[in-house]
Image (tube, rainbow, N blue to C red):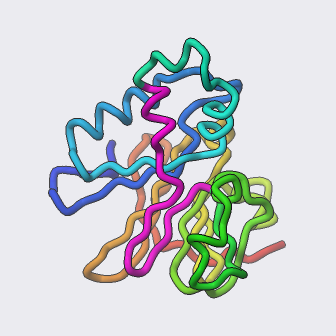
């Protein structure tokens, strides 16, 4: 059952990168995202992840240059900003404060490690790494909220078997996420800072 509804023209789907499974070179998901962008103009935003960033860097001036999916990857933005949020694959240089856009190298936006926690100017929604690291719990694969300005989408979908979704209700200014029961039905919940062991 789908948890993303793009039938409302104001709805947006923001994808935070890593569309190619290692060892990369599989454009299946990229072609699906391109199709969604064609069907829902302006509603589907795809950001650069470290998989795409590295693949583009390593395959310039090769036979991949002829593939429309490769051209699409080369143009991916590194972040998407709203008045209250920054969506990015890995993170931004928060020490740069309100100059984070010019103070964060593109490579850092894709590959920053470790992650940031605590208050920042805006909410930062990122992925890149497994949320079990942040929660200090090997079994944790949900959306991680640090209790302040950071929401992290689990980057270990190959372990969890689920693509993490964080929903933001603009009118209520409220975040929710989803888990799935044994029958695959979504259950919506509000992320809470996990109790670390």
| Residue 195 image offset from top left, x and y in percent | 73, 77
Q: Residue at x 64, y 25 (%)?
A: 24
Which residue, as the protein is rendered here, is positioned at the far front? 61
On the picture, is 80 further left or further right than 173? Answer: right
Q: Quadrant of residue 141?
A: bottom right
| Residue 41 image offset from top left, x and y in percent | 21, 46
Residue 80 in magenta?
yes
Q: Nearer the viewer, residue 51 or 162?
A: 51
User: Can residue 193 be seen?
Assistant: yes
User: Can residue 129 be seen?
Assistant: no
- For the C terminus, which image quadrant? bottom right
Which residue, as the protein is rendered here, is positioned at the far right? 197
- For the N terminus, which image quadrant? top left
Q: Which residues are magenta?
A: 69-89
Q: Quadrant of residue 8?
A: bottom left
Q: Is residue 176 above or below residue 13?
A: below
| Residue 179 image offset from top left, x and y in percent | 49, 55
Q: Quadrant of residue 132?
A: bottom right
Q: Residue at x 67, y 60 (%)?
A: 105
On the picture, is 131 further left or further right than 177? Answer: right
| Residue 162 image offset from top left, x and y in percent | 54, 43
Q: Nearer the viewer, residue 16 or 63?
A: 63
Q: Residue at x 73, y 59 (%)?
A: 112
On the picture, is 155 further left or further right than 83? Answer: right
Q: Is residue 91 above or below residue 47?
A: below
Picture mark count: 0
Which residue, as the protein is rendered here, is positioned at the far top? 63
Q: Residue at x 29, y 37 (%)?
A: 36
Residue 105 in magenta?
no
Q: Is residue 148 above or below residue 64?
A: below
């Amino acid at each position: 059952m789908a948890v993303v509804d793009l039938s409302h023209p104001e709805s947006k789907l923001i994808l935070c990168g890593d569309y190619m499974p290692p060892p990369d070179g599989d454009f299946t998901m990229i072609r699906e995202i391109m199709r969604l962008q064609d069907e829902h103009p302006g509603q589907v935003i795809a950001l650069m992840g470290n998989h795409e960033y590295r693949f583009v860097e390593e395959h310039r001036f090769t036979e991949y240059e002829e593939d429309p999916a490769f051209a699409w990857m080369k143009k991916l933005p590194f972040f998407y900003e709203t008045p209250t949020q920054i969506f990015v694959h890995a993170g931004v240089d928060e020490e740069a404060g309100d100059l984070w856009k010019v103070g964060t190298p593109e490579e850092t936006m894709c590959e920053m490690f470790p992650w940031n926690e605590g208050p920042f100017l805006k909410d930062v929604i990122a992925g890149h790494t497994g949320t079990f690291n942040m929660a200090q719990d090997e079994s944790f694969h949900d959306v991680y909220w640090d209790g302040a300005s950071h929401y992290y989408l689990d980057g270990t979908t190959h372990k969890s078997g689920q693509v993490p979704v964080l929903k933001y209700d603009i009118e209520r200014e409220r975040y929710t996420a989803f888990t799935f029961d044994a029958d695959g039905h979504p259950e919506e919940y509000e992320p809470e800072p996990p109790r670390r062991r």
